[in-house]
Image (cartoon, coloured by chain):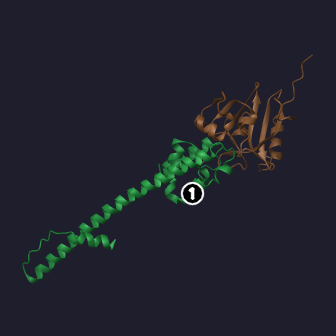
Chain colours: A green, B brown
Amino acid sequence: MPVLCEHAYRNEQTVNYRPMSRHGSKWQEFNDISAKYRQAAKEIKRHSSESQETSNQEIETEFAYLVDRWLKETIHLSLIRDKIINPAYLQIIAMGSTAVPLILRELRDRPSHWFVALQALTKSNPAEGALNPREARDKWLTWGEENGLI
Amino acid sequence: MPRDEVDRVFPKLKGKDIELSPEDFNNNCLAFALGDKNNWWEPPAQYGFYWPPGFSEDTTIETVEEIIRLHGFTIETDPTVTPKTDSIAIYGEHGQWKHFARFADGIWSSKLGESHDVERIDHLDLEIADYGKCVKILSRPTKKKKK
């Protein structure tokens, strides 16, 4: 962060410095410095936003890779108990709360047994009492919509 | 699961004229074998699973055999011989079940996890590492002819 500030400061070439009096020039210097810092702040914000976008893309790519791997290795298994100990599923849980909206979207678009991961990550269980996976899915999607996650 | 993926997981099905239904995550092989397409049978009853009340919440062959027998599949038959009546094949290892297939109307079929139902198979084609061996077949008794 400080490096970026310094970079922005050094590259600011336009100095609107008009000494009117000794006292006035101090104000002008202050204004100039303020402008430079505002510019630096803008650059930091833009850079941070770009980094965030890149980071989100990386997370989504990793998530998609893990989902594909999980499905490929476990879709034919008859027990969810066996499916959820697959390393790819555990890695998705290890991604933390950032994975929740991605899981909910996946559940909406390509239904599968995400309920264990969702419960672990959100510490909620809106699907409690669901009679079958379809009902559990509906309840989780409603929860996701209500919480602005999908 | 595309056909080539089915063949990858079940090499003995490769090149066979089988039928695949649409995928459905709402039921599993045990439900399918018992004729229930609206539930996922697995203990314990949570996360939308169904497990019949009164039975141990475990995945032992012993417990599931009790459940299957309760549904009328009471005769144990030779796993290497084609059954004469509707039957259920139990796959597993170390006393734990891993999979089921059903025999009805003269054909074997099975539900592959969250994926397709697969029809017109040989039940031994499903013996893969993830399912174990076909350890038991339970059949319905032969109907007695009315005099």
Measured as percent of width and height from the top left, residue A122 is found at 55, 57
Measured as percent of width and height from the top left, residue B124 is found at 76, 36
Q: Is residue A53 left or right of residue B96?
A: left
Can you say which quadrant of the picture contains the C terminus of chain B?
top right
Q: Relative to B111, does residue A37 appear above or below in the rendering?
A: below
Can you say which quadrant of the picture contains the N terminus of chain B?
top right
Residue shown at the point (77%, 45%) measured from the top left: B92
Q: Single out the residue that lies furthest toward the bottom.
A: A22
The mark tally for this picture is 1
Q: Single out the residue that lies furthest toward the right.
A: B147
Q: Nearer the viewer, residue A58 or A18?
A: A58
Q: Secondary structure at mark 1?
A: helix
Measured as percent of width and height from the top left, residue B27 is found at 66, 39
Which residue is tagged 1? A91
Residue shown at the point (15%, 78%) measured from the top left: A27
Q: Is residue B117 left or right of residue B100?
A: left
Q: Nearer the viewer, residue A145 or B11?
A: B11
Task: Give the letter of the chain under mark 1.
Answer: A
Q: Amino acid at mark 1?
A: Gln
Q: Single out the residue that lies furthest toward the left.
A: A20
The answer to whether residue A54 is seen in the rendering is: yes
The answer to whether residue A147 is seen in the rendering is: no
